[in-house]
Image: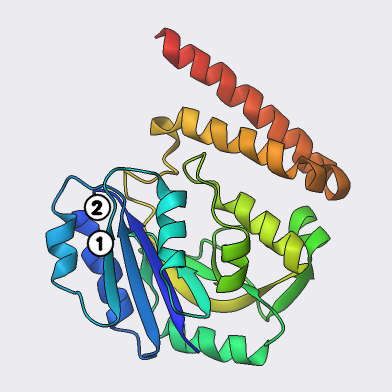
Amino acid sequence: MRFSIICATFNRASLIKNAIGSVISQSYSNWEMIIVDDGSIDNTESIVKEFLSDNIKYIKLNRNYGVGYARNKGINESSGEWIIVLDSDNKLYDDSLLLISLILKKYPTIDFHNFIVVDNNNNFLSNSISKSLIIEFKDWIKSPPKGEFHSVIRKKHLIKIPFLININGGEHITWNLIVNDVQRAAYHPIISEIYDNKSQDRLSVREKNINRIMNVHIQDMKTCWYFYFKYSKKKLIILFIKILIYKIYSIYLNKK
């Protein structure tokens, strides 16, 4: 079982060494890491080149295309059966690849898996799960476990349904489309990722990304409205309200 760890990065030379180190230190050895540099203008390239090997590949894009394009590029160049997306300011948890491989062998008919995420202080960012849980698509939309989860997906599904490239971020939209396609997803009580929630250049830092977040919500509405309408009208209403709030706030900021 081979994992392809896809790491899209942009101007994170000071952080990416930690991400790479967390992969190299894994006890499970059948992996490759594909680092896609999305047009960085810092010294990311010189940092990454210190680690290049048969297992670690580096792709430098000629400009900043966006995280979706960069991830898709890495996935298309990958050789593994399973895809793990690792942001360049996050880290894999110790021995997580070994534990994930055991889970995938235990559930061979499930193609979409989610694992626990912790922050730098080992605080859980995912709801506590005492045992593995398999949910149908309607429950994925209506009432999934809450919090941050780290997904592991069979590659063929990300080839069929790639990350969106017209917005920056919004991977949950891709997850919705894939789980709708496979109809089931699994959650497991195993920590797989350390999430750097202190980084100030994260796409999720709201104060710096009002328009980006608004565009993600709008794309979510355009793409997934029927799922929400069918299985969770409450989510549909909340999403509509979010779009209105971000639109009003965006107008306010532009007038300042």
Q: Residue at x 55, y 48 (%)?
A: 164
- What residue sits right under mark 2 in the picture? 12
- Is 70 in front, or is 228? 70
Amino acid at circle 1: Ile
Rendered location of residue 161, percent (x, y): 62, 58
Residue 1, visible in the rendered structure: yes
Q: In the image, is residue 122 above or below residue 36?
A: below
- Is 84 in front, or is 62? 62
- Secondary element under disc 1, as helix, strand or loop, is helix
| Contact check, label 2 and label 1, Cβ < 8 Å | yes
Q: Taking 249 as reference, is 57 left or right?
A: left
Q: Residue furthest right?
A: 230
Tell me the quarter of the picture where residue 37 sits: bottom left
- What residue sits right under mark 1 in the picture? 16
Q: Taking 153 as reference, is 33 left or right?
A: left
- Is 89 in front, or is 81? 81
Dot label at residue 111: none
Q: In the image, is residue 151 above or below residue 174?
A: below
Amino acid at circle 2: Arg
Q: Residue at x 40, y 66 (%)?
A: 6
Category of crowding for the residue at label 1, using alpha-carbon neighbours closer than 10 angstroms: few (below 14), some (14–19), many (at least 20) = many
Q: In the image, is residue 32 above or below residue 226?
A: below
Q: Residue furthest top?
A: 255
Image quadrant occupied by the C terminus: top left
Marks 2 and 1, how far apart at CA: 6 Å
Rendered location of residue 89, percent (x, y): 32, 58
Q: Residue at x 46, y 89 (%)?
A: 98
Number of dots carrying numbers? 2
Q: Residue at x 22, y 80 (%)?
A: 53
Category of crowding for the residue at label 2, using alpha-carbon neighbours closer than 10 angstroms: few (below 14), some (14–19), many (at least 20) = some
Colour mapping used in the image: rainbow
